[in-house]
């Protein structure tokens, strides 16, 4: 089993800030919403986005600090603008 990634202690507060948590939650909800709307499994969505299934699962599980590369892959795979990934939950 892979060990959890450790974060630098001086940055720990950043990962707990309300702004960070909100963005992470919005991204997870947006990806899940888009994937379910297309009727894709996590495996299929990951394949279409050119990423490992585990990465997509971590995005949906709010357990990843997504990079621009990850965001670009998601946008290309779902064929959406990045703003659609971060739409507030309704």
Image (cartoon, helix red, strand yellow):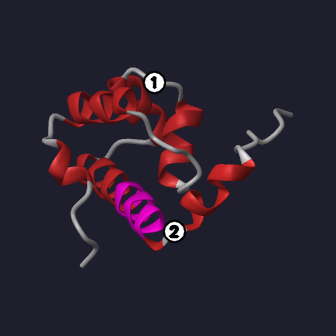
Task: Give the residue displayed 23% in from the left and 35% down from the top.
Answer: 75
* Residue 66: % across, % down: 45, 40
Q: Residue at x 70, y 44 (%)?
A: 7
Image quarter hosting the N terminus: top right
In the image, 68 versus 37, the foreground residue is 68
Which residue sits furthest bottom?
90
Q: Nearer the viewer, residue 8 or 64?
A: 8
Q: Secondary structure at mark 2?
A: loop
Tags 1 and 2 touching, CB below 8 Å? no
Near mark 1 (Cα within 10 A), the count class, few <14, some 14-19 or many ≥20, is some
Residue 34 sits above or below residue 29 on the image? above
Left or right: where 89 falls relative to 20:
left
Q: Range of the magenta residues?
A: 19-28
Of tags 1 and 2, the one toward the viewer is 2
Give x and y (percent) for residue 8.
71, 44
87 to the left or right of 70: left
Distance, label 1 to label 2, CA atoms, is 27 Å
Residue at 24%, 79% (x, y): give it. 90
Q: Identify which residue is drawn at 46% across, 73% down.
A: 18
Relative vertical location of residue 71 with respect to residue 87 in this rendering, above or below: above
Residue furthest top in the image: 50
Q: Position of residue 40 (x, y in %)?
A: 35, 42
Q: Earlier in the sequence, mark 1 or mark 2?
A: 2
**Of helix, strand and loop, which one carries label 1?**
loop
Name which quarter of the figure residue 24 lies in. bottom left
Query: Crowdedness of circle 2 by 10 Å Cα count: few (<14), some, many (20+)?
Result: few
Pointer 1: what residue?
A: 51
Q: What residue does disc 2 label?
A: 17
Magenta includes 72? no
In front here: 61 or 22? 22
Give me the disc on residue 35: none
The chief SS type of the magenta part is helix
């Amino acid at each position: 089993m892979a060990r959890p990634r450790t974060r630098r202690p001086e940055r720990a507060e950043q990962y707990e800030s309300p702004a960070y948590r909100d963005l992470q939650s919005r991204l997870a909800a947006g990806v899940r919403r888009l994937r379910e709307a297309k009727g894709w499994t996590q495996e299929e969505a990951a394949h279409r986005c050119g990423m490992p299934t585990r990465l997509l699962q971590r995005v949906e599980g709010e357990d990843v600090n997504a990079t621009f590369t990850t965001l670009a892959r998601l946008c290309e795979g779902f064929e959406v603008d990045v703003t659609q990934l971060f739409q507030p939950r309704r």
